[in-house]
Amino acid sequence: MKWFEHKPFDPRAVMGFGILNGTSIGLLNLSLGFNSVGFYQMTKLAIIPCTVLLQTLFFRKIFSRNVQLSLAFLLVGVGIATVTDLQLNALGSILSLLAVMTTCVAQIMTNTIQKKFKVSSTQLLYQSSPYQAMTLFIAGPFLDGILTNKNVFAFNYTPQVLAFIVLSCLISVSVNFSTFLVIGKTSPVTYQVLGHLKTCLVLTFGYLLLQDPFSWQNILGIMIAIIGMISYSYHCTIENQQKAMAEAAAHLLQAKEPELDPLLNVENGGSILTDGVGRGPGWNSNKDLQA
């Protein structure tokens, strides 16, 4: 529809990213299916420290002490507000570990690919969606058949069911687009912070609009999490401003260096141009008089 420019780039990177992204979605859903809700929330909380660790080890990205403390506040708050029962099992724990690892790598790749190939979030989503869809389309019905003993293709798809499927797909595209946009413009860690803000809003609106059960534990956790989010945003903003000022100063210094070069050359006995004619070192007016 010409809403954006189609920009193809390295097909291997696109294929690997699309398959990995689809795999992470499937593993997150399997983790929720084989674990309690409380343990699933713990799995989601583990994504932030895992992302920080991977970026520190493989990308040499440095997270300041203030940012680390802010993230710790956030995780503690969300954990208090959301984590209730923790029921562990071997298969569920393995699936959760794989889900965390694939999700962290996929989100880091989302940011890295956009910057490396200079593509927008829409262009990356457009290129990788077919591979992601293919991965889920092949694995989904097969796993559903094993886990539920039902065939998804034998289901009676009424117009109402199809309408809800289409609505779900439209919402999913919107979520994917916002995910790629946020990660591309900020960072994987900031996206996870935003995701935990969503969790706090879900709890709050559930209580206000749907009269869901709410306890002092939920209120305390949300307050701590919000303090962590505000602190994280503040320190990230300050650090980005300092980085921008340092880069601007470096560019200004580079721009001034060529202007200083002729003066430095004269001081060192170098040549200087007058009316487009170069005169070598050691020149003086007495030579002209003697000539």
Image (cartoon, grey):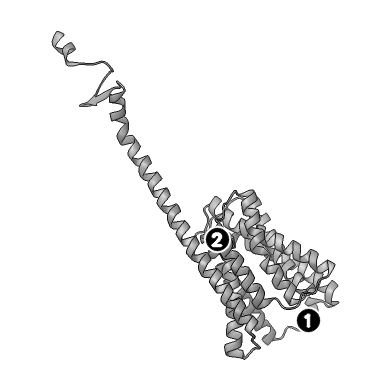
Q: Which residue is mark 2?
A: 67
Q: Which residue is mark 1?
A: 155
Residue drawn at point x = 46 percent, y = 57 percent: 240
Crowding at mark 2 (Cα within 10 Å: few <14, some 14-19, many 20+): some
Q: Nearer the viewer, residue 58 or 116?
A: 58
Crowding at mark 1 (Cα within 10 Å: few <14, some 14-19, many 20+): few
Where is residue 172 shown, x and y percent of the image? 62, 73
Where is residue 284 shown, x and y percent of the image? 20, 16
Q: Secondary structure at mark 2?
A: helix
In-image side of 71 versus 20 (left or right): left
In-image side of 11 versus 152 (left or right): left
**Residue 117 in sight in this render:** no
Rounded to the nearest angstrom, the CA distance separating label 2 from label 1 is: 49 Å
In-image side of 279 versus 140 (left or right): left
**Considering only vertical position in the picture, is 11 above or below 226?**
above
Residue 41 - label: none
Where is residue 281 shown, x and y percent of the image? 28, 17
Viewport quadrant of the C terminus: top left
